[in-house]
Image (tube, helix red, strand yellow):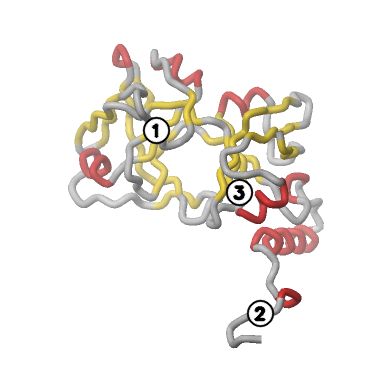
Amino acid sequence: MEIGSMPASLQLPHRAVIEHLVRQTLYQQLRQPLPVRARGAHPLVVNVSARHCHLTQEAVEALFGKGHQLSVFKALYQEGQFAAKETVTLIGPRSRVISNLRILGPCRTLNQVELAYTDAIALGFEIPLRMSGNIKETPGCMLMGPAGFFEMKQGVIRAMRHVHMHPDDAAFYRVKPGEAMTLRIGGDCAIALDKLVARVDPSFKLEVHIDTDEGNACNLQPDTPCELLKA
């Protein structure tokens, strides 16, 4: 055996398995049942992604002042991602507005606003369904912050429902990046959501993102049973 190498029999389990074991131990100590969606070697998390925006550092400075850095309000499930304390006002067609639109950090290389269709209808937008980052020929908007305005020429979308996956998760479900999956959601308002896009990266933890329209349609709760399937 070469120095620094580790035989397969001694290799550590994937992080998701370790997190599951820690979570299971915690619930046992608290004498509470383990949530349905957290069971198994590949624990599935399903989160509702409310309307929000991703901004470049240039946009942040235009809205909040030169040199301003986003500050953390709450860490998100994916490593390094956070909801910022900073919010903006979105000005849509015919001067209709949404206030307190949350910025998600860290800053990105493009500006993007993600809305549900009901948000877009209220604002008077016609927005396309797109994967995050695909903003070509999409509507723009005006953002207002405490230090000024920032005009987005494009970038207002409804994000396609998707699942973040580590390569080990993708292998477990036998899917490749970009392939479609199905999410079955139980409960009194049970539904199945097709065309769930698999996004695979070594930095990802297994997590499904649906928007508020979809979450409200099935009355998604923390203990709602969910099942992820290959389409």
Mark 2 or mark 3: whose residue is earlier in sequence: 2
Residue at 67 percent of width and 61 percent of height? 19
Q: Give the amino acid type for the residue marked by disc 2 in the picture.
A: Met
- Residue 139: % across, % down: 34, 22
**Nearer to the camera, 131 or 3:** 3
Q: Nearer the viewer, mark 1 or mark 2?
A: 2
Name the element at disc 2. Answer: loop
Indicate the quadrant containing the C terminus: top left, top right, bottom left or bottom right.
top right
Local crowd at mark 1 within 10 Å, few (<14), some, or many (≥20)? some
Name the element at disc 1. Answer: strand
Name the element at disc 3. Answer: strand
Residue at 51 percent of width and 56 percent of height? 79
Mark 1 or mark 2: whose residue is earlier in sequence: 2
Q: Nearer the viewer, mark 2 or mark 3?
A: 2
Q: Give the amino acid type for the residue marked by disc 3 in the picture.
A: Met
Please tell me in which quadrant of the rendered image residue 46 appears. top right
Q: Nearer the viewer, mark 3 or mark 1?
A: 3
Q: Give the amino acid type for the residue marked by disc 1 in the picture.
A: Leu
- Estimate the spatial distance between the alpha carbons at disc 3 and disc 1, rounded to whole Å: 27 Å
Residue at 66 percent of width and 86 percent of height? 1
Q: Which mark is residue 6?
A: 2
Q: Label 3 belongs to which residue?
A: 165
Asked if the residue under mark 2 is in contact with the one under mark 1, i.e. CB atoms within 8 Å, the reply is: no
**Nearer to the camera, 144 or 121:** 121
Q: Which mark is residue 101?
A: 1
- Residue 21: % across, % down: 74, 63
- Estimate the spatial distance between the alpha carbons at disc 1 and disc 2, rounded to whole Å: 48 Å
- On screen, 71 above or below 160? below
